[in-house]
Every structure is written in C-alpha cells, then in structure tokens.
Image (tube, rainbow, N blue to C red):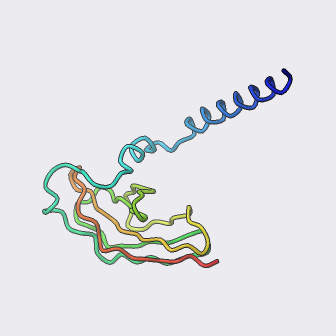
Amino acid sequence: MKSLVVVLGVLSLMAMACAQSDKSRQPNQSEIESKRRPGGGSGDTSSISQVTGLSANASGPTEISLKWNRVPNATSYWIYRDKYVPAIIQNTNYADKSVSPGTTYTYAIAAVVNGTRGPKSSSVKVTTPR
C-alpha cells in the first residue's frame, strides 16, 4: 500500500510538471507545432523565390549556425532539419542549439510570402564535432 501511494505521488508530480511546461512555451509555439510537418501549404508556390546562399557551420558540438540570402517580401522562414521543422523565424540567420555532438544534420530553408510557403532551398549537410 505504501509503494502504491509513492507511485501515485510521483505520477501526480510528473503530471503537474507537464502542465507547467505548457505554460512556459514561447508565444508562437502553438503556431510552430501546428506547422511542424513539412509539405502542404496553400496557394501557388511558383511565384515565391527559392532561398539561396544557405550555409551551415558547426559553431561547436551542440550548435550549428545557419545563414542565407533574404527573399523579397518574405515574412518568415521555415528551418528544416532533416524532416523536422525546429523553428519558424523572421531573420536570415539561425543558431540551432538542439543538436548533438558528432552528428550529421541536413538543413534547408523555405520562405513564406503572403502566407504561402515557397519551395525549399538546396540542402546543406553539416556534422558537429565530438
């Protein structure tokens, strides 16, 4: 009986921690989460310029820095890491700090113009040092 009470106590603490983590999400986290799956999009993407000049450098074992050229009239950029979208940002540079040492990642960027996501850029690969 005592172990059951301990287990229930631990489970309730975990549930409270999960509820608290939802409250600390960044303001646009819901938008990012709803758009994490690549593909789809609305409207004609052929009129949106493809992002060019993408470069990626490992700034250290747990950080990769990305830079690319601005797309005219872009309001945001989707960062693709492999098949995942870790961020949607407004700048033309990004520091990915959620990477692991000694791992190879593939990145691409897509611009959003007038609410429509354009084509992905050519991809670049980068490996973090150990």
Q: Quadrant of residue 101?
A: bottom right
Q: Quadrant of residue 125?
A: bottom left
Horizontal side of residue 28 vs 49, given as left or right? right
Horizontal side of residue 16 vs 113, given as left or right? right
Q: Quadrant of residue 80?
A: bottom left
Q: What percent of the width, then of the height, locates residue 40?
A: 24, 51
| Residue in the picture at 68% in, 34% down | 14
| Residue in the picture at 60% in, 75% down | 102
How many marks the image carries: the answer is 0
Q: What percent of the width, then of the height, locates residue 97?
A: 56, 63
Quarter of the image with the N terminus is: top right
| Residue in the picture at 53% in, 42% down | 25
Q: Nearer the viewer, residue 38 or 50?
A: 38
Q: Using the image, determine if residue 57 lies above or below residue 88.
A: below
Q: What percent of the width, then of the height, locates residue 108?
A: 36, 68
Q: Using the image, determine if residue 27 lies above or below residue 91.
A: above
Q: Using the image, determine if residue 39 lies above or below residue 100.
A: above
Horizontal side of residue 25 vs 40, given as left or right? right
Quarter of the image with the C terminus is: bottom right
